[in-house]
Amino acid sequence: MKQKKAQWPWHVLTVLVLIGLAGALYYATSLMSYEWRWNRVPQYFAYHAEESQRAADISTVSELVRKGDKAEVTLRNDAGDEQHLTVDDNSLQVAQGDDVAEGDVIGVTRHWAAGPLMWGLWTTLWLSVVSGVLGLLIGLATGLCRLSNNPTLRDLSTIYVELVRGTPLLVQIFIFYFFIGTVMNLSREFAGIAALSLFTGAYVAEIIRSGVQSIARGQNEAARSLGLSAGQSMRHVVLPQAFKRVLPPLAGQFISLVKDTSLVSVIAITELLKSGREVITTSFSPFEILFCVAGLYLLINLPLSKIASRLERRLAQSD
Amino acid sequence: MIEVRDLVKVFDTRGQVVRAVDNVSTAVAKGEVLVVIGPSGSGKSTFLRCLNGLEEFDSGSVSIDGLQLADPKTDVNAYRREVGMVFQHFNLFPHMTVLENLCLAQKVVRKRGKKEREAKALALLEKVGIAQKANEYPSRLSGGQQQRVAIARALAMEPKVMLFDEPTSALDPEMVGEVLDVMKTLAVEGMTMVCVTHEMGFAREVADRVLFFDHGKLLEDASPAEFFDAPKDPRAQAFLRQVL
Protein backbone atom coordinates (compact mmCIF):
# COMPACT_ATOMS: atom_id res chain seq x y z
CA MET A 1 0.00 0.00 0.00
CA LYS A 2 1.21 3.45 -0.89
CA GLN A 3 1.58 5.69 2.14
CA LYS A 4 0.96 9.37 1.89
CA LYS A 5 3.89 11.19 3.43
CA ALA A 6 3.68 14.73 4.73
CA GLN A 7 5.27 17.26 2.37
CA TRP A 8 5.65 20.20 4.71
CA PRO A 9 8.90 19.18 6.44
CA TRP A 10 10.59 19.34 3.05
CA HIS A 11 9.23 22.80 2.37
CA VAL A 12 10.55 23.88 5.77
CA LEU A 13 13.94 22.46 4.76
CA THR A 14 13.80 24.49 1.53
CA VAL A 15 13.22 27.66 3.53
CA LEU A 16 16.10 26.79 5.87
CA VAL A 17 18.44 26.24 2.92
CA LEU A 18 17.45 29.61 1.46
CA ILE A 19 17.99 31.35 4.80
CA GLY A 20 21.39 29.66 5.06
CA LEU A 21 22.39 30.88 1.62
CA ALA A 22 21.28 34.43 2.41
CA GLY A 23 23.26 34.30 5.66
CA ALA A 24 26.36 33.10 3.85
CA LEU A 25 26.02 35.94 1.38
CA TYR A 26 25.67 38.44 4.18
CA TYR A 27 28.72 37.00 5.93
CA ALA A 28 30.75 37.15 2.72
CA THR A 29 29.97 40.83 2.19
CA SER A 30 30.71 41.64 5.81
CA LEU A 31 34.17 40.15 5.33
CA MET A 32 34.98 42.76 2.69
CA SER A 33 33.46 45.47 4.86
CA TYR A 34 30.80 46.50 2.39
CA GLU A 35 28.34 49.01 3.74
CA TRP A 36 24.82 48.30 2.62
CA ARG A 37 22.92 51.49 1.91
CA TRP A 38 19.50 50.40 0.75
CA ASN A 39 18.07 53.79 1.68
CA ARG A 40 19.86 55.27 -1.33
CA VAL A 41 18.04 53.06 -3.76
CA PRO A 42 14.41 54.29 -3.87
CA GLN A 43 15.31 57.70 -5.31
CA TYR A 44 16.51 55.98 -8.48
CA PHE A 45 13.06 54.48 -8.99
CA ALA A 46 11.11 57.68 -8.38
CA TYR A 47 11.98 61.00 -6.84
CA HIS A 48 10.33 64.22 -5.88
CA ALA A 49 11.33 66.63 -8.60
CA GLU A 50 11.37 70.37 -7.88
CA GLU A 51 10.61 72.95 -10.47
CA SER A 52 11.40 76.59 -9.65
CA GLN A 53 8.77 79.19 -10.51
CA ARG A 54 10.34 82.52 -11.37
CA ALA A 55 9.12 86.06 -11.86
CA ALA A 56 9.05 87.12 -15.51
CA ASP A 57 9.57 90.84 -14.94
CA ILE A 58 10.32 93.45 -12.30
CA SER A 59 7.07 93.47 -10.38
CA THR A 60 5.26 93.53 -7.06
CA VAL A 61 3.42 90.70 -5.29
CA SER A 62 -0.06 92.12 -5.58
CA GLU A 63 -2.04 89.18 -4.33
CA LEU A 64 -1.24 86.04 -2.35
CA VAL A 65 -3.92 83.41 -1.72
CA ARG A 66 -3.18 80.23 0.27
CA LYS A 67 -5.22 77.21 -0.72
CA GLY A 68 -4.36 74.10 1.29
CA ASP A 69 -0.68 73.40 0.72
CA LYS A 70 -0.63 75.52 -2.44
CA ALA A 71 -0.13 79.25 -2.72
CA GLU A 72 -1.44 81.32 -5.64
CA VAL A 73 0.74 84.34 -6.28
CA THR A 74 -0.21 87.22 -8.55
CA LEU A 75 2.58 89.55 -9.70
CA ARG A 76 1.90 92.92 -11.27
CA ASN A 77 4.51 94.99 -13.10
CA ASP A 78 4.57 98.74 -13.76
CA ALA A 79 2.64 98.36 -17.00
CA GLY A 80 -0.14 96.62 -15.11
CA ASP A 81 0.44 93.18 -16.66
CA GLU A 82 -0.29 90.31 -14.30
CA GLN A 83 1.56 87.04 -13.90
CA HIS A 84 -0.15 84.18 -12.04
CA LEU A 85 1.94 81.49 -10.36
CA THR A 86 1.00 78.51 -8.21
CA VAL A 87 3.71 77.16 -5.92
CA ASP A 88 3.93 74.81 -2.94
CA ASP A 89 3.04 76.80 0.17
CA ASN A 90 6.02 75.69 2.26
CA SER A 91 8.45 76.77 -0.46
CA LEU A 92 7.04 80.29 -0.77
CA GLN A 93 9.85 82.86 -0.84
CA VAL A 94 7.82 86.09 -0.93
CA ALA A 95 5.15 87.92 1.05
CA GLN A 96 2.36 90.28 0.07
CA GLY A 97 3.76 93.60 -1.24
CA ASP A 98 7.31 92.35 -1.85
CA ASP A 99 9.17 93.68 -4.86
CA VAL A 100 10.76 91.04 -7.07
CA ALA A 101 13.22 91.25 -9.93
CA GLU A 102 13.15 89.35 -13.20
CA GLY A 103 14.22 85.76 -12.60
CA ASP A 104 13.65 85.78 -8.86
CA VAL A 105 12.44 82.46 -7.46
CA ILE A 106 8.94 82.81 -6.06
CA GLY A 107 8.71 79.20 -4.94
CA VAL A 108 8.85 75.65 -6.26
CA THR A 109 6.35 73.05 -7.39
CA ARG A 110 7.10 69.45 -6.56
CA HIS A 111 5.94 66.37 -8.39
CA TRP A 112 6.89 62.74 -8.60
CA ALA A 113 9.17 61.81 -11.50
CA ALA A 114 10.35 58.41 -12.68
CA GLY A 115 13.98 57.73 -11.88
CA PRO A 116 16.56 56.21 -14.23
CA LEU A 117 15.76 52.64 -13.17
CA MET A 118 12.11 53.09 -14.13
CA TRP A 119 13.08 54.58 -17.49
CA GLY A 120 15.46 51.66 -18.00
CA LEU A 121 12.71 49.19 -17.16
CA TRP A 122 10.40 50.89 -19.64
CA THR A 123 13.04 50.79 -22.39
CA THR A 124 13.72 47.12 -21.72
CA LEU A 125 9.99 46.41 -21.84
CA TRP A 126 9.28 48.03 -25.16
CA LEU A 127 12.46 46.66 -26.72
CA SER A 128 11.36 43.18 -25.64
CA VAL A 129 7.79 43.55 -26.86
CA VAL A 130 8.72 44.98 -30.27
CA SER A 131 11.56 42.49 -30.84
CA GLY A 132 9.38 39.65 -29.56
CA VAL A 133 6.50 40.38 -31.93
CA LEU A 134 8.85 40.86 -34.89
CA GLY A 135 10.83 37.77 -33.91
CA LEU A 136 7.64 35.70 -33.77
CA LEU A 137 6.57 36.86 -37.23
CA ILE A 138 10.04 36.31 -38.70
CA GLY A 139 10.26 32.92 -36.99
CA LEU A 140 6.84 31.81 -38.23
CA ALA A 141 7.67 32.77 -41.82
CA THR A 142 11.14 31.22 -41.65
CA GLY A 143 9.88 28.05 -39.96
CA LEU A 144 7.33 27.54 -42.74
CA CYS A 145 10.02 28.26 -45.36
CA ARG A 146 12.15 25.54 -43.77
CA LEU A 147 9.30 23.11 -44.44
CA SER A 148 8.57 24.40 -47.93
CA ASN A 149 8.86 22.29 -51.05
CA ASN A 150 10.66 25.13 -52.80
CA PRO A 151 14.44 24.49 -52.62
CA THR A 152 15.37 28.19 -52.71
CA LEU A 153 13.12 29.06 -49.77
CA ARG A 154 14.41 26.04 -47.90
CA ASP A 155 18.06 26.87 -48.57
CA LEU A 156 17.76 30.57 -47.73
CA SER A 157 15.91 29.93 -44.48
CA THR A 158 18.42 27.25 -43.47
CA ILE A 159 21.34 29.60 -44.16
CA TYR A 160 19.69 32.34 -42.10
CA VAL A 161 19.00 30.06 -39.16
CA GLU A 162 22.48 28.55 -39.16
CA LEU A 163 24.22 31.93 -39.51
CA VAL A 164 22.28 33.51 -36.68
CA ARG A 165 22.42 30.53 -34.34
CA GLY A 166 26.11 29.99 -34.99
CA THR A 167 27.28 33.49 -34.07
CA PRO A 168 27.07 35.33 -30.74
CA LEU A 169 24.27 37.85 -30.30
CA LEU A 170 26.79 40.40 -29.06
CA VAL A 171 28.69 40.18 -32.35
CA GLN A 172 25.43 40.50 -34.30
CA ILE A 173 24.52 43.64 -32.36
CA PHE A 174 27.90 45.19 -33.15
CA ILE A 175 27.61 44.26 -36.82
CA PHE A 176 24.12 45.74 -37.00
CA TYR A 177 25.10 48.95 -35.32
CA PHE A 178 28.58 49.64 -36.61
CA PHE A 179 28.36 48.09 -40.08
CA ILE A 180 24.78 47.87 -41.32
CA GLY A 181 23.74 50.81 -39.15
CA THR A 182 26.45 53.01 -40.60
CA VAL A 183 25.86 51.93 -44.19
CA MET A 184 22.08 52.40 -43.98
CA ASN A 185 22.16 55.20 -41.44
CA LEU A 186 20.08 53.40 -38.82
CA SER A 187 19.37 54.71 -35.35
CA ARG A 188 20.80 52.69 -32.46
CA GLU A 189 17.32 51.59 -31.39
CA PHE A 190 16.54 50.38 -34.90
CA ALA A 191 19.81 48.47 -35.08
CA GLY A 192 19.23 46.96 -31.64
CA ILE A 193 15.69 45.84 -32.42
CA ALA A 194 16.75 44.45 -35.79
CA ALA A 195 19.51 42.37 -34.21
CA LEU A 196 17.30 41.12 -31.37
CA SER A 197 14.34 40.22 -33.57
CA LEU A 198 16.45 38.45 -36.20
CA PHE A 199 18.19 36.53 -33.42
CA THR A 200 14.88 35.54 -31.82
CA GLY A 201 13.38 34.78 -35.24
CA ALA A 202 16.02 32.13 -35.96
CA TYR A 203 15.28 30.28 -32.73
CA VAL A 204 11.51 30.65 -33.09
CA ALA A 205 11.81 29.26 -36.64
CA GLU A 206 13.36 26.06 -35.32
CA ILE A 207 10.74 25.80 -32.58
CA ILE A 208 7.91 26.25 -35.10
CA ARG A 209 9.46 23.80 -37.54
CA SER A 210 9.83 21.09 -34.93
CA GLY A 211 6.30 21.77 -33.70
CA VAL A 212 4.79 21.43 -37.15
CA GLN A 213 6.78 18.27 -37.83
CA SER A 214 5.58 16.74 -34.57
CA ILE A 215 1.95 16.84 -35.72
CA ALA A 216 0.93 13.47 -37.12
CA ARG A 217 0.83 13.33 -40.92
CA GLY A 218 -2.72 12.03 -40.76
CA GLN A 219 -3.95 15.44 -39.57
CA ASN A 220 -2.78 17.12 -42.76
CA GLU A 221 -4.08 14.19 -44.83
CA ALA A 222 -7.51 14.41 -43.23
CA ALA A 223 -7.66 18.15 -43.90
CA ARG A 224 -6.49 17.76 -47.50
CA SER A 225 -8.96 14.92 -48.12
CA LEU A 226 -11.75 17.32 -47.12
CA GLY A 227 -10.65 19.69 -49.87
CA LEU A 228 -8.63 22.16 -47.80
CA SER A 229 -5.62 23.60 -49.61
CA ALA A 230 -2.14 23.15 -48.18
CA GLY A 231 -2.26 26.66 -46.73
CA GLN A 232 -5.73 26.21 -45.22
CA SER A 233 -4.71 22.91 -43.68
CA MET A 234 -1.62 24.54 -42.17
CA ARG A 235 -3.59 27.48 -40.81
CA HIS A 236 -6.66 25.70 -39.44
CA VAL A 237 -5.41 22.24 -38.54
CA VAL A 238 -1.64 21.91 -38.19
CA LEU A 239 -0.50 25.26 -36.77
CA PRO A 240 -3.07 25.47 -33.94
CA GLN A 241 -2.00 22.04 -32.72
CA ALA A 242 1.69 22.80 -33.22
CA PHE A 243 1.34 26.09 -31.34
CA LYS A 244 -0.03 24.28 -28.32
CA ARG A 245 2.92 21.92 -28.37
CA VAL A 246 5.61 24.59 -28.77
CA LEU A 247 4.22 26.96 -26.17
CA PRO A 248 6.72 25.97 -23.43
CA PRO A 249 9.87 26.37 -25.58
CA LEU A 250 8.40 29.53 -27.10
CA ALA A 251 7.85 31.03 -23.64
CA GLY A 252 11.45 30.11 -22.78
CA GLN A 253 12.63 31.89 -25.90
CA PHE A 254 10.80 35.10 -24.99
CA ILE A 255 12.13 34.99 -21.45
CA SER A 256 15.60 34.68 -22.98
CA LEU A 257 14.85 37.63 -25.21
CA VAL A 258 13.95 39.86 -22.25
CA LYS A 259 17.30 39.04 -20.69
CA ASP A 260 19.16 39.39 -23.98
CA THR A 261 17.96 42.97 -24.37
CA SER A 262 20.60 43.80 -21.73
CA LEU A 263 23.21 43.25 -24.46
CA VAL A 264 22.10 46.29 -26.45
CA SER A 265 23.56 48.42 -23.67
CA VAL A 266 26.84 48.01 -25.57
CA ILE A 267 25.52 50.25 -28.33
CA ALA A 268 24.50 52.85 -25.75
CA ILE A 269 20.79 52.14 -25.55
CA THR A 270 19.89 53.07 -21.99
CA GLU A 271 17.91 50.00 -21.07
CA LEU A 272 17.66 48.51 -17.61
CA LEU A 273 21.24 47.27 -17.21
CA LYS A 274 22.81 50.45 -18.60
CA SER A 275 20.58 52.60 -16.40
CA GLY A 276 21.73 50.49 -13.47
CA ARG A 277 25.38 50.96 -14.35
CA GLU A 278 24.87 54.71 -14.68
CA VAL A 279 23.14 54.81 -11.31
CA ILE A 280 26.04 52.92 -9.74
CA THR A 281 28.45 55.65 -10.83
CA THR A 282 26.47 58.25 -8.89
CA SER A 283 25.22 56.19 -5.93
CA PHE A 284 28.36 54.18 -5.14
CA SER A 285 26.07 51.29 -4.16
CA PRO A 286 26.84 48.69 -6.82
CA PHE A 287 25.48 45.64 -4.99
CA GLU A 288 22.13 47.15 -4.10
CA ILE A 289 21.57 48.49 -7.59
CA LEU A 290 22.59 45.24 -9.29
CA PHE A 291 20.24 43.27 -7.07
CA CYS A 292 17.47 45.71 -7.96
CA VAL A 293 18.22 45.36 -11.66
CA ALA A 294 18.09 41.58 -11.37
CA GLY A 295 14.83 41.90 -9.44
CA LEU A 296 13.31 44.06 -12.17
CA TYR A 297 14.18 41.48 -14.84
CA LEU A 298 12.47 38.89 -12.64
CA LEU A 299 9.50 41.21 -12.37
CA ILE A 300 9.05 40.98 -16.14
CA ASN A 301 9.84 37.31 -16.53
CA LEU A 302 7.89 35.73 -13.69
CA PRO A 303 4.52 37.01 -14.98
CA LEU A 304 5.61 35.93 -18.46
CA SER A 305 6.07 32.31 -17.41
CA LYS A 306 2.86 32.53 -15.41
CA ILE A 307 0.91 33.68 -18.48
CA ALA A 308 2.52 30.92 -20.57
CA SER A 309 1.56 28.18 -18.13
CA ARG A 310 -1.96 29.53 -17.84
CA LEU A 311 -2.30 29.60 -21.64
CA GLU A 312 -0.94 26.07 -21.74
CA ARG A 313 -3.59 24.91 -19.29
CA ARG A 314 -6.35 26.60 -21.23
CA LEU A 315 -5.26 24.97 -24.48
CA ALA A 316 -5.04 21.61 -22.72
CA GLN A 317 -8.79 21.42 -22.24
CA SER A 318 -9.19 19.45 -25.47
CA ASP A 319 -6.80 16.71 -24.24
CA MET B 1 -18.20 7.19 -62.21
CA ILE B 2 -14.62 6.40 -61.13
CA GLU B 3 -12.29 5.29 -63.89
CA VAL B 4 -8.89 3.84 -63.05
CA ARG B 5 -6.59 3.04 -65.95
CA ASP B 6 -3.16 1.37 -65.85
CA LEU B 7 -2.45 2.83 -62.42
CA VAL B 8 1.16 2.41 -61.27
CA LYS B 9 2.63 3.56 -57.98
CA VAL B 10 6.25 2.78 -57.20
CA PHE B 11 7.89 3.30 -53.82
CA ASP B 12 11.63 3.79 -54.05
CA THR B 13 13.21 3.76 -50.62
CA ARG B 14 16.98 3.73 -50.71
CA GLY B 15 17.14 1.83 -53.95
CA GLN B 16 14.57 -0.74 -52.87
CA VAL B 17 11.88 -0.47 -55.49
CA VAL B 18 8.42 -1.72 -54.61
CA ARG B 19 5.59 -1.63 -57.12
CA ALA B 20 2.85 -0.94 -54.59
CA VAL B 21 0.18 -0.58 -57.25
CA ASP B 22 1.04 -2.46 -60.39
CA ASN B 23 -0.93 -1.68 -63.52
CA VAL B 24 -4.42 -1.64 -62.06
CA SER B 25 -7.47 -0.81 -64.14
CA THR B 26 -11.03 -0.83 -62.90
CA ALA B 27 -14.18 1.22 -62.82
CA VAL B 28 -16.80 2.01 -60.22
CA ALA B 29 -20.35 2.78 -61.25
CA LYS B 30 -22.57 5.26 -59.43
CA GLY B 31 -24.08 3.71 -56.31
CA GLU B 32 -21.73 0.75 -56.42
CA VAL B 33 -20.01 -0.57 -53.29
CA LEU B 34 -16.52 -1.94 -53.86
CA VAL B 35 -14.66 -3.82 -51.19
CA VAL B 36 -10.90 -4.14 -51.60
CA ILE B 37 -9.24 -6.98 -49.74
CA GLY B 38 -5.86 -8.60 -49.66
CA PRO B 39 -3.01 -9.45 -47.34
CA SER B 40 -1.16 -6.62 -45.63
CA GLY B 41 1.37 -4.95 -47.89
CA SER B 42 -0.65 -5.91 -50.95
CA GLY B 43 -1.06 -2.27 -52.04
CA LYS B 44 -4.80 -1.96 -51.36
CA SER B 45 -4.44 1.10 -49.11
CA THR B 46 -2.04 2.73 -51.55
CA PHE B 47 -4.53 2.07 -54.33
CA LEU B 48 -7.25 3.75 -52.29
CA ARG B 49 -5.05 6.75 -51.47
CA CYS B 50 -4.28 7.19 -55.17
CA LEU B 51 -8.01 7.63 -55.81
CA ASN B 52 -8.02 11.04 -54.08
CA GLY B 53 -4.44 12.00 -54.76
CA LEU B 54 -3.11 11.65 -51.23
CA GLU B 55 -0.59 9.39 -52.91
CA GLU B 56 0.84 10.71 -56.18
CA PHE B 57 0.94 7.90 -58.70
CA ASP B 58 3.67 7.37 -61.25
CA SER B 59 1.62 6.58 -64.33
CA GLY B 60 -1.87 5.77 -65.46
CA SER B 61 -4.98 7.80 -64.80
CA VAL B 62 -7.73 8.24 -62.24
CA SER B 63 -10.88 10.21 -63.00
CA ILE B 64 -14.20 10.95 -61.38
CA ASP B 65 -17.06 11.92 -63.69
CA GLY B 66 -14.46 12.67 -66.33
CA LEU B 67 -12.38 14.94 -64.08
CA GLN B 68 -8.79 13.74 -64.47
CA LEU B 69 -6.84 13.74 -61.20
CA ALA B 70 -3.40 13.79 -62.82
CA ASP B 71 -4.28 16.57 -65.25
CA PRO B 72 -2.24 19.67 -64.27
CA LYS B 73 -5.29 21.80 -65.12
CA THR B 74 -7.40 19.99 -62.51
CA ASP B 75 -7.72 21.75 -59.17
CA VAL B 76 -6.83 18.93 -56.78
CA ASN B 77 -8.67 20.63 -53.92
CA ALA B 78 -11.85 20.88 -55.99
CA TYR B 79 -11.45 17.22 -56.93
CA ARG B 80 -11.05 16.16 -53.31
CA ARG B 81 -14.24 17.97 -52.31
CA GLU B 82 -16.11 15.30 -54.25
CA VAL B 83 -14.29 12.43 -52.57
CA GLY B 84 -14.80 11.78 -48.87
CA MET B 85 -12.23 9.73 -47.01
CA VAL B 86 -12.31 7.85 -43.71
CA PHE B 87 -9.03 6.78 -42.17
CA GLN B 88 -7.97 3.82 -40.06
CA HIS B 89 -6.96 6.11 -37.19
CA PHE B 90 -9.94 8.49 -37.58
CA ASN B 91 -7.65 11.57 -37.80
CA LEU B 92 -10.17 13.83 -36.13
CA PHE B 93 -8.83 17.29 -35.35
CA PRO B 94 -8.13 17.02 -31.61
CA HIS B 95 -8.15 20.77 -30.95
CA MET B 96 -11.73 21.14 -32.18
CA THR B 97 -15.02 19.93 -30.79
CA VAL B 98 -16.99 17.34 -32.74
CA LEU B 99 -19.19 20.08 -34.16
CA GLU B 100 -16.19 22.18 -35.19
CA ASN B 101 -14.64 19.10 -36.83
CA LEU B 102 -17.74 18.81 -39.00
CA CYS B 103 -17.96 22.53 -39.73
CA LEU B 104 -14.36 23.40 -40.63
CA ALA B 105 -14.31 22.25 -44.24
CA GLN B 106 -17.91 23.37 -44.80
CA LYS B 107 -16.83 26.86 -43.76
CA VAL B 108 -13.40 27.08 -45.34
CA VAL B 109 -13.99 25.11 -48.52
CA ARG B 110 -17.74 25.24 -49.18
CA LYS B 111 -18.15 28.77 -47.70
CA ARG B 112 -21.40 27.82 -45.99
CA GLY B 113 -22.94 30.17 -43.45
CA LYS B 114 -22.84 29.36 -39.75
CA LYS B 115 -26.50 28.32 -39.49
CA GLU B 116 -26.40 26.18 -42.58
CA ARG B 117 -23.21 24.33 -41.70
CA GLU B 118 -24.24 23.69 -38.10
CA ALA B 119 -27.65 22.41 -39.16
CA LYS B 120 -25.95 20.10 -41.64
CA ALA B 121 -23.46 18.93 -39.01
CA LEU B 122 -26.12 18.23 -36.40
CA ALA B 123 -28.27 16.36 -38.90
CA LEU B 124 -25.31 14.13 -39.80
CA LEU B 125 -24.39 13.55 -36.15
CA GLU B 126 -28.02 12.54 -35.61
CA LYS B 127 -27.69 10.14 -38.50
CA VAL B 128 -24.56 8.45 -37.10
CA GLY B 129 -26.14 8.43 -33.65
CA ILE B 130 -23.96 10.78 -31.61
CA ALA B 131 -25.73 14.13 -31.72
CA GLN B 132 -25.42 14.41 -27.94
CA LYS B 133 -21.60 14.55 -28.25
CA ALA B 134 -21.56 17.58 -30.55
CA ASN B 135 -19.73 19.81 -28.11
CA GLU B 136 -17.27 17.25 -26.78
CA TYR B 137 -13.64 17.06 -27.81
CA PRO B 138 -12.66 13.91 -29.74
CA SER B 139 -10.43 12.71 -26.89
CA ARG B 140 -13.54 12.19 -24.79
CA LEU B 141 -15.08 9.81 -27.31
CA SER B 142 -14.60 6.07 -27.75
CA GLY B 143 -12.93 4.77 -30.89
CA GLY B 144 -16.22 3.76 -32.44
CA GLN B 145 -17.74 7.16 -31.74
CA GLN B 146 -14.68 8.89 -33.18
CA GLN B 147 -14.89 6.88 -36.35
CA ARG B 148 -18.58 7.71 -36.73
CA VAL B 149 -17.72 11.40 -36.32
CA ALA B 150 -15.05 10.97 -39.00
CA ILE B 151 -17.63 9.48 -41.35
CA ALA B 152 -20.03 12.35 -40.61
CA ARG B 153 -17.21 14.85 -41.21
CA ALA B 154 -16.56 13.43 -44.66
CA LEU B 155 -20.29 13.33 -45.46
CA ALA B 156 -20.70 16.99 -44.52
CA MET B 157 -18.93 17.90 -47.76
CA GLU B 158 -21.61 15.99 -49.71
CA PRO B 159 -19.09 13.91 -51.63
CA LYS B 160 -19.96 11.83 -54.67
CA VAL B 161 -17.76 8.98 -53.46
CA MET B 162 -16.67 7.76 -50.05
CA LEU B 163 -13.34 6.01 -49.55
CA PHE B 164 -12.80 3.91 -46.42
CA ASP B 165 -9.26 2.92 -45.46
CA GLU B 166 -9.59 0.02 -42.99
CA PRO B 167 -12.13 1.99 -40.93
CA THR B 168 -12.55 -0.73 -38.27
CA SER B 169 -8.99 -2.04 -37.96
CA ALA B 170 -8.03 0.25 -35.07
CA LEU B 171 -11.22 -0.37 -33.11
CA ASP B 172 -11.90 -2.56 -30.12
CA PRO B 173 -13.96 -5.53 -31.30
CA GLU B 174 -17.16 -4.42 -29.55
CA MET B 175 -17.13 -1.14 -31.51
CA VAL B 176 -16.73 -2.58 -34.97
CA GLY B 177 -20.46 -3.20 -35.33
CA GLU B 178 -21.58 0.39 -34.79
CA VAL B 179 -19.24 1.66 -37.50
CA LEU B 180 -20.17 -1.08 -39.97
CA ASP B 181 -23.84 -0.29 -39.35
CA VAL B 182 -23.31 3.30 -40.41
CA MET B 183 -21.47 2.11 -43.53
CA LYS B 184 -24.28 -0.30 -44.37
CA THR B 185 -26.83 2.49 -44.05
CA LEU B 186 -24.79 4.58 -46.48
CA ALA B 187 -24.58 1.71 -48.93
CA VAL B 188 -28.33 1.18 -48.77
CA GLU B 189 -28.88 4.89 -49.42
CA GLY B 190 -26.97 4.53 -52.68
CA MET B 191 -23.62 6.12 -51.78
CA THR B 192 -20.79 5.11 -54.07
CA MET B 193 -18.18 3.51 -51.81
CA VAL B 194 -14.73 1.98 -52.04
CA CYS B 195 -13.76 0.19 -48.81
CA VAL B 196 -10.47 -1.38 -47.89
CA THR B 197 -11.35 -3.72 -45.06
CA HIS B 198 -10.68 -7.03 -43.37
CA GLU B 199 -14.33 -7.46 -42.46
CA MET B 200 -15.24 -10.40 -44.66
CA GLY B 201 -18.81 -10.45 -43.34
CA PHE B 202 -19.29 -6.86 -44.44
CA ALA B 203 -17.79 -7.64 -47.84
CA ARG B 204 -20.07 -10.59 -48.39
CA GLU B 205 -23.19 -8.77 -47.21
CA VAL B 206 -22.80 -5.26 -48.61
CA ALA B 207 -20.32 -5.31 -51.49
CA ASP B 208 -21.44 -5.28 -55.10
CA ARG B 209 -17.94 -6.29 -56.18
CA VAL B 210 -14.87 -7.52 -54.39
CA LEU B 211 -11.35 -6.64 -55.57
CA PHE B 212 -8.51 -8.86 -54.40
CA PHE B 213 -4.99 -7.38 -54.36
CA ASP B 214 -1.65 -9.03 -53.81
CA HIS B 215 1.81 -7.54 -54.44
CA GLY B 216 0.22 -4.49 -56.02
CA LYS B 217 -1.66 -6.48 -58.63
CA LEU B 218 -5.41 -6.66 -58.98
CA LEU B 219 -5.84 -10.43 -59.11
CA GLU B 220 -9.56 -10.85 -58.83
CA ASP B 221 -12.57 -8.65 -59.54
CA ALA B 222 -15.78 -10.53 -58.86
CA SER B 223 -19.13 -10.46 -57.11
CA PRO B 224 -18.92 -11.45 -53.41
CA ALA B 225 -20.70 -14.73 -54.08
CA GLU B 226 -18.23 -15.69 -56.81
CA PHE B 227 -15.23 -14.49 -54.86
CA PHE B 228 -15.97 -16.13 -51.53
CA ASP B 229 -17.42 -19.36 -52.87
CA ALA B 230 -15.30 -19.97 -55.95
CA PRO B 231 -12.15 -17.80 -56.06
CA LYS B 232 -10.22 -18.36 -59.27
CA ASP B 233 -6.80 -17.04 -58.35
CA PRO B 234 -4.68 -19.45 -56.27
CA ARG B 235 -3.41 -16.62 -54.03
CA ALA B 236 -6.98 -15.53 -53.34
CA GLN B 237 -7.81 -19.13 -52.45
CA ALA B 238 -4.87 -19.26 -50.04
CA PHE B 239 -5.82 -15.92 -48.49
CA LEU B 240 -9.42 -16.94 -47.95
CA ARG B 241 -8.37 -20.24 -46.38
CA GLN B 242 -6.39 -18.24 -43.82
CA VAL B 243 -8.97 -15.60 -42.92
CA LEU B 244 -12.24 -17.54 -43.05
Image (cartoon, coloured by chain):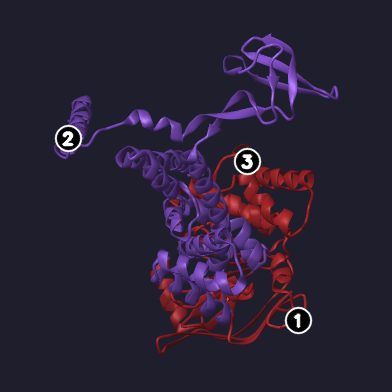
Helix, strand or loop under label 3: loop
Tell me which residue sits at (50%, 37%) in the image: A115
Question: In the rendered structure, the residue with mark 1 lies on which chain?
Answer: B
Q: Amino acid at mark 1?
A: Lys
- Distance CA(mark 3)–CA(mark 2): 68 Å
Report x, y in % for residue A206: 46, 65
Q: Give the vertical position of B188 relative to B49 (above or below).
A: above
**Colour purple belongs to chain:** A
Residue of label 3: B134
Indicate which label's residue lies in the foreground, 1 or 2. Answer: 2
In this rendered view, identify the residue nearer to me: A121 or B179: A121
| Quadrant for the N terminus of chain A in the image | top left
Give, as a three-letter code, the residue at label 3: Ala
Q: Which chain is red?
A: B
Do tag 1 and tag 2 residues touch (Cβ < 8 Å)?
no
Q: Position of residue A70 (x, y in %)?
A: 65, 15
Residue hosting label 2: A30
Side of B8 relative to A283 (left or right): right
Mark 2 is on which residue type?
Ser
Q: Residues within 10 Å of mark 3 (few under 14, many from 20)?
A: some
Q: CB of mark 3 within 8 Å of CB of mark 2?
A: no
Labelled disc at residue B73:
1
